[in-house]
Image (cartoon, rainbow, N blue to C red):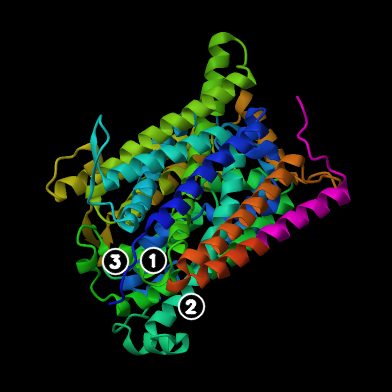
């Protein structure tokens, strides 16, 4: 097998510099947040290209480099099909859901529930949505740290911090979680958008370098021979469309989750309603659809080589729950020079950050605008000041982050990253989003229909969890009910916990939601609210023809351009100490980053001069 190069001091420097930069972004854009609409939706004027990149990048995390890599290692053909389903999902956003979300004219995701159903529905969803989404946050951090601690070679070490002794893996969880919390707390949605842009560039740079180098390694120095060897020596049936250990019903279940996740998930809605014009949402969805088909194929293409190069991952990583999930990082340790390895660690870190910071922001938006403000207004008789609302929002981000870090410390025993992530999503996504999916399109149900639908679905899915824990022979504790697996056969079809959660949630939630339509009565405040909602949904949300990108948007673009230039210069400089070990790859990546950064800065300057936009932010 090829020799592996673990991260060294040079790579640690690159990774530390990246984390420091992320914190600097939080401080830089914190001045954009003069009120809560700035903090939670960028003032409603986020440039569509910036929102598009953020929308796309937030759709994947370290899962793509860990969980997806594990799937690709064992099922090449199945992975190609599996990770192309986002294209039709985004096309549904192009034709339907993108414009609809912009027409809702909301400031936070769950305000939709208040407009379409009732304020009580928002409280109810908040209570149910925060816990499962924080579970997902913890799992994302956990998945990320599988990579980071392994690549750093510290997962088995013990560190004495004075107040506690932590393993290398646990220390990685703690540090990573704290960085995520601090920068998201400071910067709000603008921080999310800016870092998503630079994260996209990092991931793209690593991918562009990894593809040819993987096949050069497989072909003993010749990429063309590497491609030929892939088809000659790949395991039997490797390119068949199948997934080992997954039943037939996994495929339609996965597709349903993708449709929901890319159209009515709250962070998707947040990107769509944060732009100025509904026509921008169509541009976003179209570009995301194209990128979601092309780029995942680029990310998994190098992993096709790993079953041949590393046929026994278990011997390499005996301490991992699923060693195949380390296939991408193993390949990177074999082909990338130092410096680029540090950038890869930053790429994996940034990929997860793009998902976690999005969740942090919208969850805090919900708790602040949809829970705290109404309750505080009712108790005190006046609306809390913008300063107080901002303070509450940032406090919510910090507290959610602490809880997510705790979850990350406690999910290790429930399987590999892919399986745990899928189980977590299957607990809530369909049950909570059936009323949202249908409610955007159909308004013939009463104000309490979402509450009834979700209640029935949650009880049914928890019933599946209790059944799964008993069948597995474990005590029905909270974590066991949430994550214990189960295998049953219905009408000749095999189902695991993932398919059962989806099927039960869809049938029960959807069925109850439909039944409530027979009790639809429009009276009082609900009648006024739903008629106003219906009117808005029929009215295009177009911006004024003279609307231009504001100084916040231009400064965000310019800041991203400067970060790209700085990254390019750093990579070029890293060529010199790593030249003898293939450091020329650092120069290639550095020149690409440098070129992208210069193009972005020049484009911003031309736009600003053409439209006479001031450089300074407006004062209150």
Do the CB atoms of the residues marked 3 and 1 lie less than 8 Å apart? no
What residue do we see at 39% from left, 60% from top? 253
On the image, numbered disc 3 is attached to which residue?
324
| Disc 1 crowd, CA 10 A, few/some/many (<14, 14-19, 20+) | some
Q: Position of residue 80 (x, y in %)?
A: 44, 73
Mark identifier at residue 251: 1
Horizontal side of residue 170 vs 604, given as left or right: left
Residue 519 in sight: no
Q: Which residues are magenta?
A: 596-620
| Disc 3 crowd, CA 10 A, few/some/many (<14, 14-19, 20+) | many
Do the CB atoms of the residues marked 2 and 3 lie less than 8 Å apart? no
> Which numbered disc flags the more N-terminal residue, 3 or 1?
1
* Residue 558 inside the magenta-drawn segment: no
The image quadrant where one finds the N terminus is bottom left
What residue do we see at 72% from left, 49% from top? 278
On the image, numbered disc 2 is attached to which residue?
212
Horizontal side of residue 111 vs 345, given as left or right: right
Q: Nearer the viewer, residue 9 or 278?
A: 9
* Residue 602 inside the magenta-drawn segment: yes
Q: Position of residue 68 (x, y in %)?
A: 39, 63
Mark 2 → mark 1, Cα distance in angstroms: 31 Å
Q: How would you classify the magenta stretch by its main secondary structure? A: helix
Residue 333 in sight: yes
Mark 2 or 3, closer to the camera: 2
> Which numbered disc flags the more N-terminal residue, 2 or 3?
2
Mark 3 → mark 1, Cα distance in angstroms: 21 Å
Q: Position of residue 212 (x, y in %)?
A: 48, 78
């Amino acid at each position: 097998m090829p020799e592996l190069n673990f991260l060294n001091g040079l790579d640690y420097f690159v990774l530390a510099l990246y984390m420091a930069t992320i914190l600097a972004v939080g401080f830089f854009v914190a001045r954009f947040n003069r009120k809560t609409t700035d903090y939670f939706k960028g003032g409603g004027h986020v440039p569509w290209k910036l929102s598009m990149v953020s929308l796309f990048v937030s759709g994947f995390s370290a899962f793509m480099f860990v969980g997806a890599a594990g799937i690709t290692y064992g099922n090449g053909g199945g992975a190609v099909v599996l990770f192309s389903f986002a294209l039709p999902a985004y096309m549904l956003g192009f034709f339907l859901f993108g414009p609809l979300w912009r027409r809702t004219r909301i400031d936070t995701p769950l305000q939709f529930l208040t407009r379409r159903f009732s304020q009580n529905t928002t409280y109810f969803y908040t209570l149910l949505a925060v816990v499962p989404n924080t579970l997902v946050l913890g799992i994302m951090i956990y998945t990320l740290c599988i990579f980071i601690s392994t690549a750093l070679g510290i997962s088995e070490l013990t560190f004495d911090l004075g107040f506690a002794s932590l393993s290398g893996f646990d220390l990685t969880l703690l540090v990573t979680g704290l960085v995520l919390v601090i920068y998201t707390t400071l910067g709000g949605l603008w921080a999310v958008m800016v870092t998503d842009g630079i994260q996209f560039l990092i991931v793209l740079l690593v991918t562009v370098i990894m593809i040819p180098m993987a096949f050069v390694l497989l072909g003993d120095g010749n990429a063309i021979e590497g491609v030929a060897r892939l088809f000659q020596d790949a395991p039997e049936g490797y390119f068949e469309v199948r997934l080992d250990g997954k039943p037939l019903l996994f495929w339609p279940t996965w597709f349903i989750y993708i449709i929901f996740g890319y159209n009515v998930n709250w962070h998707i809605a947040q990107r769509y309603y944060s732009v100025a014009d509904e026509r921008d949402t169509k541009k976003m969805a179209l570009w995301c659809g194209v990128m979601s088909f092309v780029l995942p194929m680029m990310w998994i293409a190098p992993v096709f080589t790993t079953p041949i190069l590393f046929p026994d991952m278990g011997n390499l990583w005996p301490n991992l729950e699923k060693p195949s999930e380390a296939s991408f990082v193993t390949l990177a340790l074999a082909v990338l020079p130092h410096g680029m390895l540090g950038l890869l660690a930053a790429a994996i870190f940034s990929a997860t950050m793009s998902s976690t910071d999005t969740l942090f922001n919208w969850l805090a938006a919900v708790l602040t605008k949809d829970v705290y403000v109404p309750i505080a207004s009712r108790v005190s008789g006046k609306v809390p000041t913008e300063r107080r609302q901002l303070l509450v929002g940032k406090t919510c981000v910090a507290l959610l982050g602490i809880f997510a870090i705790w979850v990350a410390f406690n999910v290790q025993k429930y399987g590999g990253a892919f399986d745990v992530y899928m189980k977590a999503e299957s607990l809530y996504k369909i049950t909570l989003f059936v009323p949202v999916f249908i409610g955007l399109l159909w308004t013939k149900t009463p104000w309490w229909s979402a509450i009834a639908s979700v209640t029935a679905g949650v009880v049914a899915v928890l019933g599946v969890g209790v059944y799964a824990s008993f069948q597995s022979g474990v005590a029905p504790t909270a974590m066991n009910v949430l994550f214990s697996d189960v295998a049953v056969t219905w009408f000749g079809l095999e189902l695991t916990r993932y398919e059962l959660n989806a099927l039960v949630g869809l049938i029960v939630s959807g069925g109850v939601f439909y039944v409530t339509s027979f009790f639809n009565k429009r009276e009082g405040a609900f009648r006024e609210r739903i008629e106003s909602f219906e009117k808005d949904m029929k009215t295009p949300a177009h911006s004024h023809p003279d609307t231009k990108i504001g100084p916040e948007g231009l400064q965000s673009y310019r800041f991203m351009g400067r970060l790209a230039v700085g990254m390019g210069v750093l990579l070029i400089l890293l060529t010199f100490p790593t030249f003898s070990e293939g450091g020329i790859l650092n120069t290639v990546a550095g020149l690409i980053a440098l070129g992208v950064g210069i193009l972005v800065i020049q484009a911003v300057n031309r736009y600003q001069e053409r439209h006479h936009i001031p450089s300074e932010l407006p004062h209150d």
